[in-house]
Amino acid sequence: MKKLFTLTIALGLTISSFAQIQSLSGPRIGAAFITASPTSAFINGDYELFDGNMSDIDGYSKGTMTSLYGWQFESRFADGGDVTGIVEWVLLAGGMERGKFLPSISSMVGARTASGLEFAIGPNLSLGGIAMVFGAGYNFKVGELNMPVNFAFVPGRKGSYEEEDEFITEYITVDPDGIPNNGDEYMDWIDILNTPGYTVDYHTGNRFSITCGFNLNK
């Protein structure tokens, strides 16, 4: 009986220790700063993401701010009392205040302490491609309310693509032998090189974001 009582007390203390580390799944709102890139040009209204021509972006693009709205899902592993492992899935959408829709999804693995401090890292997928996201945050408690505040950084990457030669078609006189006015000339539509091909270099843009969440103690 004494052993059973001791085991019950120990189990209760263990559960209480695990319960100190809150589950912070729930809605997220925030903002992001995106450095000069096709994405920032799209948000600013200077560029259509899928028009395939980014040759002028460096001339008029600049960094921009955008709102963020989404949801965080999470699960835990390796509970250790004062520290527990977490897996987070963060779904966010930006640009909506300007009539745009820029979705992103992050899968992050990290750790959270009983004090509310956390850090995580993982892949991020957005219209700019796939990259790594680095995050850190802290959970502010207001009574029974959790207010996790998180900072994230997604480094951009360099890219390039080839613009092909551009031709214009003109209806001109063709002289096969190069001797003028000898009777073999004829009129035909001929492709004339207008713009030679070139390489376009671009950067997907660095993203810095801050989000805040809300949920009740669980």
Image (tube, rainbow, N blue to C red):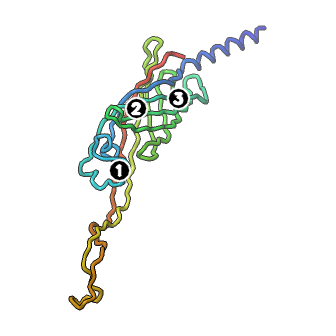
Q: Which residue is mark 2?
A: 151
The residue closer to the viewer here, 96 or 200, is 96
> Observer-nearest residue: 150 or 89?
89
Q: Earlier in the sequence, mark 3 or mark 2?
A: 3
Percent coordinates x, y for residue 100 in the rendering: 35, 37
Q: Which label lies toward us, 1 or 2? A: 1
124 left or right of 193? right
Q: Is residue 193 above or below residue 212?
A: below
Q: Residue at x 54, y 21 (%)?
A: 21
The answer to which quarter of the image holds residue 102 is top left
Question: For mark 1, does the 10 Å Cα neighbourhood hold few (<14), some (14 to 19), or many (20 or more) residues?
Answer: some
Q: Which residue lies under the disc numbered 3? A: 73
Name above or below for residue 167 compared with residue 7: below
Q: Position of residue 78 (x, y in %)?
A: 61, 29
Residue 76 on image: x %, y %: 58, 28
Who's the residue at 41% across and 41% down the image?
Answer: 154
Q: Position of residue 31 (x, y in %)?
A: 35, 31
Identity of the residue drawn at 43% across and 38% down: 103
Query: Left or right: 123 with respect to 40?
Result: right
Q: Which residue is mark 1?
A: 203
| Mark 1 vs 2, N-terminal side | 2
Q: Earlier in the sequence, mark 3 or mark 1?
A: 3
Count the labels in the image: 3
- Between the C-alphas of marks 3 and 1, the distance is 30 Å
